[in-house]
Image (tube, grey):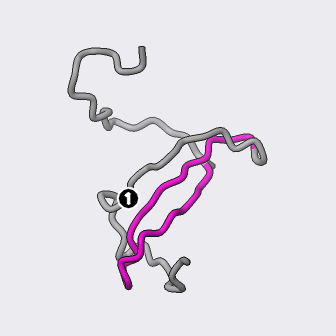
């Protein structure tokens, strides 16, 4: 059962989130993301879903440490 606390971005950090799944969301014809993070008030692990509404370029590099192509 999920907690009833409101989530406030001020108390959430990217390092707390774990991506569980990336999937095609056929209902809205876009990429869906399922992720988990702790509730800042009670530490319950919450599962959230989101859809992509904007795609842009970034200068961040993927955290790939090996030279082998992991997608082969």
Residue 54 as seen in the image, left or right of residue 27: left
Quadrant where the N terminus sits is bottom right
Residue at horizontal 51 percent and vertical 63 percent from the top: 47
Q: Is residue 11 magenta?
A: no
Look at the numbered disc 1 and give the secondary structure of its residue. loop
Q: Bounds of the magenta span?
A: 29-51
Measured as percent of width and height from the top left, residue 22 is found at 54, 42
Q: In the orientation shown, which residue stands out farthest toward the front?
A: 1
Quadrant where the C terminus sits is top left
Residue 63 as seen in the image, left or right of residue 22: left
Q: Is residue 45 magenta?
A: yes
Quickly name the residue at label 1: 17
Residue 15 as seen in the image, left or right of residue 22: left
Q: Is residue 31 above or below residue 42?
A: above
Measured as percent of width and height from the top left, residue 7 is found at 48, 77
Measured as percent of width and height from the top left, residue 29 is found at 74, 41
Tell me where residue 49 sits by quadrant. Answer: bottom right
């Amino acid at each position: 059962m999920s907690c009833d606390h409101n989530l406030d971005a001020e108390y959430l950090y990217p390092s707390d989130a774990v991506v569980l799944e990336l999937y095609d969301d056929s209902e809205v014809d876009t990429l869906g993301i399922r992720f988990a993070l702790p509730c800042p008030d009670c530490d319950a692990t919450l599962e959230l879903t989101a859809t992509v509404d904007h795609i842009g370029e970034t200068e961040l590099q993927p955290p790939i440490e090996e030279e082998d192509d992991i997608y082969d």
